[in-house]
Amino acid sequence: MLKRADFPENFLFGAATSAYQIEGHAFGGAGPTHWDTFAAKPGNVVNNENGAVACDHYHRYEQDLDLLLGFDAYRFSTSWARVLPEGRGPVNQEGLDFYDRLVDAVLERGLKPFLTLYHWELPATLADLGGWTNREIAGWFGDYTDIVMDRIGDRVASVATINEPWCVSYLSHFLGHHAPGLRDIGATANAVHNVLLAHGVAMERLRARGQDNLGIVLNFEALRPGSQKPEDLAAAATYDDVMNRLFIQPLMTGTYPDAIMAGLGSHLPQRWQDDMDLISKPMDWLGVNYYTRQTIVAAPSEPWPSTRFITTDCDKTQMGWDIYPEGLHETLTWLTDEFTGDMPLFVTENGMAWDDKVINGTVNDSERMDYISRHLQQIHRAIGDGCNVQGFFYWSLMDNYEWAFGYDKRFGMIHVDFETQKRTPKESYHLLKQVIRRDRGGI
């Protein structure tokens, strides 16, 4: 049975959220986002739901942070559209005031504030100018970074530039599942590169101001070929480039993976190579988001990347995702061996959605309890194998707006009744609190 003492002395246990998913974007003078635009189009989001109210964290942040007492750190994001309602130009002081209060409240509870500058809520006015397909966004993001850091940079323990660039670019511009909902290979190539460039510009601005403990948060999936046929082995390798190497390779080596060059290379912006030195400047740490495994087979009749998933008989989450804890160990050791070496790694998101119900005032989510236990065991195993993993953040602190799934999927350790806004800690929350107690605890 694992306990806190089984992990390194300074290992951090925390929980994560994001601004648009919990705050209530209708409050505090925030401007419209491309998620509001996307959700307003029927068919894009379950029940056409948006983040207007969400968990009303904007008004309830004190009680929500109280739930984190006993944890070590809190990962949160600032909303670009709350700070700059038009994306550029006039600052919304009410929005900055909110984040000022929030960071102070985090510190008052003995928590380390782990800031993410961008978690997907692009101001709608910038989306109308091309959003992530417009190269100028790198400078706009740099300016936004300066404004946020001028206000709260003196108190945050860590800064991530962007959360899951793969979702910001590929999922949103090639697959069309997230805002802005495009299915355009040229837009995808430009978005991929401009997200990386924006990271590089933000890192340059942050370094110039003396900010330290800087990184980025990437999402990874374990994968396996559907068979040992050559075409399926090749398809799995292609998917690995598209899913797992698309961002870590340029960030660490200044090069794009082979499959990306084959599929997107001719669509990349002119003289893209000139940006790679800036994009690949050293970081202080890497955030690793891990949830599932995919089984890949070739789909030669389909356009690039000519791959598809097949369903397995593995246990699944409410999202239909394979539960495969061993993949977290595989991911951490692969990153360490191939890219990061002794660079600190943080598991910045890991969790599962389940159809949680409040029954007699409690939520018995034994499936999530098992999920957390098994994934922590794999982190412990990776540390034993030489990976410099320094923290674990459960996704998410509370049930929230789950993007295209609206309020249908529940990832939280805290159940939220979205009509009454009542918070009910689930059994998984009590389990993790027990694990991280400094006097005793175990799983």
Image (tube, helix red, strand yellow):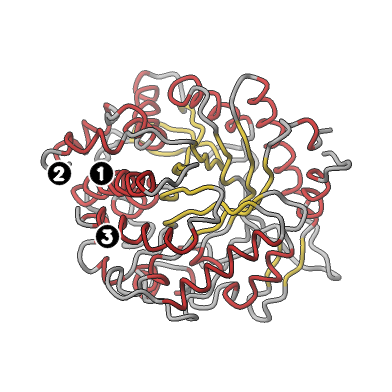
Q: From the viewer's perspective, is residue 440 above or below residue 43?
A: above
For badge 2, the amino acid type reads Pro
Looking at the image, is mark 2 or mark 1 earlier in the sequence? 1
Numbered badge on residue 269 = 2
Q: Is residue 41 visible?
A: no
* Image position, residue 345 (x, y; %): 55, 34
Q: Is residue 345 visible?
A: yes
In the picture, the quarter occupied by the N terminus is top right
Nearer to us: label 3 or label 2: 3
Q: Quadrant of residue 409?
A: bottom right
Q: From the viewer's perspective, is residue 116 above or below residue 22?
A: above
- Do the residues under discs 2 and 1 have CB atoms within 8 angstroms? yes
Q: Which residue is mark 3?
A: 140
State the residue at coordinates (67%, 30%): 378
State the residue at coordinates (40%, 30%): 240
Q: Is residue 302 left or right of residue 60?
A: left
Q: Which residue is mark 1?
A: 193
Q: Is residue 358 left or right of residue 157?
A: right
Q: Nearer the viewer, residue 221 or 231?
A: 221
Numbered badge on residue 45 = none
Nearer to us: label 3 or label 1: 3
Is label 1 in a helix, a strand or a loop?
helix
* Image position, residue 43 (x, y; %): 39, 69
Q: Quadrant of residue 134?
A: bottom left
In the picture, the quarter occupied by the C terminus is top right
Q: Quadrant of residue 396?
A: bottom right
For badge 1, the amino acid type reads His
What is the spatial separation of the Cα atoms under label 2 and label 1, in whole angstroms?
8 Å
Is label 2 in a helix, a strand or a loop?
loop
Q: Nearer the viewer, residue 403 or 376?
A: 376
* Image position, residue 209 (x, y; %): 38, 49
